[in-house]
Amino acid sequence: MEGTALRFAAVARMLAERARTEGLRPPSFRSPPGLSGVQRTVRHRAGGASVAVRLRNRPWAAVVADMVEGVVVANRLTGTDADRVRAVLWAALDEHDAVAA
């Protein structure tokens, strides 16, 4: 679990950095969600949003997808804006993986 938590933290930092670059307000990330039986929650607050993602017993790709979607939901993006940001975030993840390899 520790390795997964470290990966989660690294992806959270990278997504927050890229969100800022795109002029978005990055959410904070944590795990697990406070609600049982859910994979991801997003809580909006006056100072921003918090995205909680379940890590245990899930494919890593599903965890990362929830984090990317969390950025979109936290910024209340829809339509083409949401699609563009998803593409930018996934491309940033690909760049990050290429550098780490």
Image: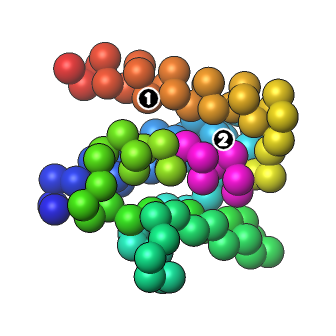
Taking 83 as reference, is 42 above or below it? below
Separation of disc 2 and disc 1 at Cα? 15 Å
Give the class, few, some or many, for how many residues have Cα within 10 Å of label 1's Cα (few <14, many ≥20): some
Q: Is residue 52 among what the camera can see? A: no
> How far from the left and from the top, in percent, is residue 68?
55, 43
Tell me whether circle 2 and circle 1 mark residues in contact (CB < 8 Å).
no
Q: Residue at x 20, y 20 (%)?
A: 101
Taking 56 as reference, is 94 above or below it? above
Q: Is residue 24 among what the camera can see? A: yes
Q: Amino acid at mark 1?
A: Leu
Question: Is 81 or 11 nearer to us in this picture?
Answer: 81
Question: Is 69 or 18 nearer to us in this picture?
Answer: 69
The quadrant in which residue 24 appears is: top right
Q: Nearer the viewer, mark 2 or mark 1?
A: 1
Q: Secondary structure at mark 1?
A: helix
Q: Earlier in the sequence, mark 2 or mark 1?
A: 2
Q: Residue at x 82, y 28 (%)?
A: 80
Which residue corresponds to mark 1?
93
Q: Amino acid at mark 2?
A: Arg
Q: Residue at x 60, y 46 (%)?
A: 69
Q: Residue most toward the left?
A: 2
> How far from the left and from the top, in percent, is residue 54?
38, 65
Range drawn in magenta: 68-74
> How far from the left and from the top, in percent, is residue 79?
84, 34
Which residue corresponds to mark 2?
20
Q: Tell whether 52 sits left or right of 84.
A: left
> How far from the left and from the top, in percent, is residue 7?
27, 48
Magenta span: chief secondary structure: helix
